[in-house]
């Protein structure tokens, strides 16, 4: 008799393995829903914990930046972009490269007229004649 019960149980399991009818758990849907909700809640807690840790790190980073006078990468890029835009205002071509001061970008002063320049190169007595 024990053998018959054993064989009977084995055939029942074989039927399940071959794709036969499984016994349906009436609470399976409810359990799955609870499991999904628990996973969602755990994920939200994980994200909140990560956001808190990242905020603490950013406070520490900002303290270091303030201490050593370092700018954020985004700020440096924004300043560089603003400088390039300011250099190219009114220009129809590509932005000019930075030109060191004193390299010919200063407007020429025209205090003296051409006549005054010519008079400078004349001999002394002729200069006196023109100045009077």
Image (cartoon, helix red, strand yellow):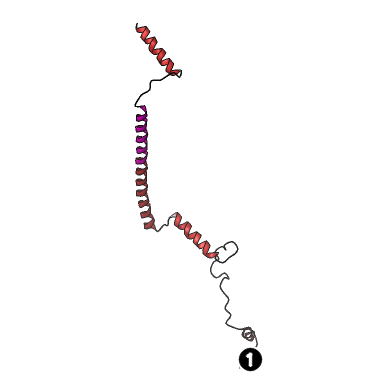
Which residue matches tag 1? 130
Overall secondary structure of the magenta stretch? Answer: helix
User: Taking 70 as reference, is 91 above or below it?
Assistant: below
Range shown magenta: 28-44
Q: Which of 86 and 31 is in front in this view?
A: 31
User: Taking 5 as reference, is 116 above or below it?
Assistant: below
User: Taking 65 as reference, is 14 above or below it?
Assistant: above
Q: Which of 5 and 124 is in front in this view?
A: 5
Point out residue 107 in the picture as x, y percentages from the top left corner. 57, 74
How many neighbours does mark 1 have within 10 angstroms: few (below 14), some (14-19), or many (20 or more)? Answer: few
- Tell me the element at label 1: helix
49 magenta-colored:
no
Q: Residue at x 48, y 57 (%)?
A: 77
Q: State which quarter of the image contains the N terminus.
A: top left
Q: Which residue is drawn at 37% across and 57% down?
A: 66
Point out residue 28 in the picture as x, y percentages from the top left corner. 36, 27
Point out residue 29 in the picture as x, y percentages from the top left corner. 37, 29
User: Taking 94 as reference, is 45 above or below it?
Assistant: above
Horizontal placement of 125 versus 88: left or right? right
Horizontal placement of 79 versus 127: left or right? left
Q: Nearer the viewer, residue 48 or 14?
A: 14
- The image quarter containing residue 114 is bottom right
Q: Which residue lies furthest to the top in this view?
A: 1
Point out residue 58 in the picture as x, y percentages from the top left corner. 37, 51
- The image quarter containing residue 95 is bottom right
């Amino acid at each position: 008799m024990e053998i018959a019960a054993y064989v009977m149980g084995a055939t029942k399991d074989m039927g399940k393995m071959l794709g036969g009818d499984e016994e349906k758990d009436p609470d399976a849907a409810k359990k799955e829903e609870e499991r999904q909700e628990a996973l969602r809640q755990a994920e939200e807690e994980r994200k909140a914990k990560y956001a808190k840790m990242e905020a603490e790190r950013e406070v520490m980073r900002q303290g270091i930046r303030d201490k050593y006078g370092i700018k954020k990468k985004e700020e440096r890029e924004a300043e560089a972009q603003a400088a390039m835009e300011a250099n190219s205002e009114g220009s129809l071509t590509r932005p000019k490269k930075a030109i060191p001061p004193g390299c010919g970008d200063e407007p020429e002063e025209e205090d003296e007229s051409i006549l005054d320049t010519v008079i400078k190169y004349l001999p002394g007595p002729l200069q006196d004649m023109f100045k009077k």
